[in-house]
């Protein structure tokens, strides 16, 4: 659903942050494959370029760091 939201509105920073959050947490809790972190990082980069000041984007970035370190 989040991918559909971004497809409809490529500037939907909160959906991109949610994708980042979901991928980082999936990596952390279910499947320790690099592709989940890579997808989270790609979504975070796009979200940061659009809505850098949004708290959701900052929290999503923190989840990437946490998932990488865990």
Image: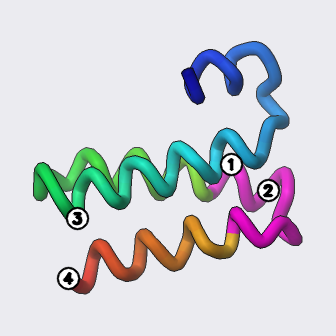
Labelled pair 1, 3 in contact (Cβ < 8 Å): no
Q: Is residue 61 above or below residue 19?
A: below
- Which comes sooner in the sequence, label 3 or label 2? 3
- Which comes sooner in the sequence, label 1 or label 3? 3
Q: Nearer the viewer, mark 1 or mark 3?
A: 3
Cα separation, mark 4 vs mark 3, equals 7 Å
| Circle 2 SS class | helix
Residue 14, x across and y down, in percent: 74, 47
Q: Nearer the viewer, mark 3 or mark 2?
A: 3
| Circle 3 SS class | helix
- Using the image, tell me which numbered label, if any, was put on residue 70: 4
Cα separation, mark 1 vs mark 2, equals 5 Å
Name the foreground residue: 47 vs 1.
1
Q: Is residue 59 above or below residue 11?
A: below
Instruction: Report the residue marked by disc 3.
Output: 28
- Using the image, tell me which numbered label, if any, was put on residue 37: none
Specify the farthest residue to the bottom: 69
| Residue 55 lies within the magenta run | yes
Instruction: Report the residue marked by disc 2.
Output: 49
Find the magenta span and give its range.
Answer: 45-57
Q: Which quadrant would the C terminus be assigned to in this image? A: bottom left
């Amino acid at each position: 659903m989040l991918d559909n939201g971004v497809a409809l509105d490529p500037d939907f920073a909160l959906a991109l942050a949610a994708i980042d959050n979901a991928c980082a947490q999936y990596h952390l809790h279910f499947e320790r494959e690099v592709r989940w972190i890579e997808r989270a990082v790609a979504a975070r980069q796009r979200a940061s370029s659009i809505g850098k000041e949004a708290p959701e984007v900052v929290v999503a970035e923190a989840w990437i760091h946490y998932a990488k370190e865990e």
